[in-house]
Image (cartoon, grey):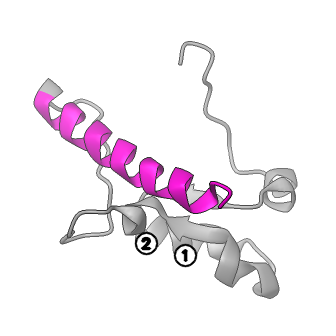
C-alpha cells in the first residue's frame, strides 16, 4: 500500500474503467452523473451491496481518524465484499 496514491476521477479514467466501486450511494450518483447514460447503469456499483452478510446499510464508512477496532471492522467488511466480487468474476 505504500505506493498507493489517490487520484481525482478524471474523464480518461471513466472511459478506461470497466467497473467503478464506490463506498456509498451518494458517491455512486455523483460518479454516475459524469458518465454517459448507456454506461451509467452498469458501470458504477456500491461495494457494500456485495456484502455476503445481511446488512443494514450499503454505506461503507471511512475509518480515517477512528479507533483501531472500527478500522478492523471496516477492513473485514471490505474483505468480505471483495471476496464476493472475486467469486463473481472467477471463471466457472
Farthest front residue? 92
**For residue 13: magenta?**
no
45 or 50, nearer to the observer: 50
Q: Main secondary structure of the magenta part?
A: helix
Q: Indicate the quadrant containing the C terminus: top left, top right, bottom left or bottom right.
A: bottom right
Q: Secondary structure at mark 2?
A: helix
Separation of marks 2 and 1 at Cα, in angstroms:
6 Å
Residue 62, image x, y percentages: 32, 44
Q: Is residue 45 left or right of residue 51?
A: right
| Circle 1 Cα neighbour tier, 10 Å, few/some/many (<14 / 14–19 / ≥20) | some
Name which quarter of the figure residue 42 lies in: bottom right
Q: Is residue 80 left or right of residue 7?
A: left
From what the image shows, is residue 14 above or below residue 66? below
Name which quarter of the figure residue 64 lies in: top left
Q: In the rendering, which numbered label is found on residue 25?
A: 2
Residue drawn at (81%, 80%) of the image: 36
Residue 45, image x, y percentages: 54, 68
Residue drawn at (62%, 69%) of the image: 44
Which segment is the magenta one? 69-92
53 or 12, nearer to the observer: 53
Q: Is residue 11 left or right of residue 75?
A: right
Residue drawn at (62%, 26%) of the image: 5
Q: Which residue bears the numbered disc 1?
A: 29
Residue 65, image x, y percentages: 24, 29
Farthest top residue? 2
Amino acid at each position: 500500500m505504500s505506493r498507493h496514491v489517490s487520484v481525482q476521477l478524471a474523464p480518461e479514467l471513466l472511459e478506461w474503467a470497466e467497473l467503478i466501486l464506490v463506498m456509498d450511494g451518494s458517491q455512486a450518483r455523483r460518479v454516475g452523473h459524469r458518465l454517459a447514460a448507456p454506461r451509467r447503469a452498469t458501470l458504477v456499483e456500491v461495494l457494500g451491496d456485495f456484502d455476503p452478510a445481511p446488512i443494514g446499510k450499503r454505506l461503507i464508512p471511512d475509518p480515517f481518524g477512528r479507533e483501531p477496532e472500527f478500522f478492523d471492522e471496516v477492513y473485514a467488511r471490505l474483505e468480505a465484499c471483495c471476496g464476493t466480487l472475486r467469486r463473481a468474476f472467477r471463471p466457472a
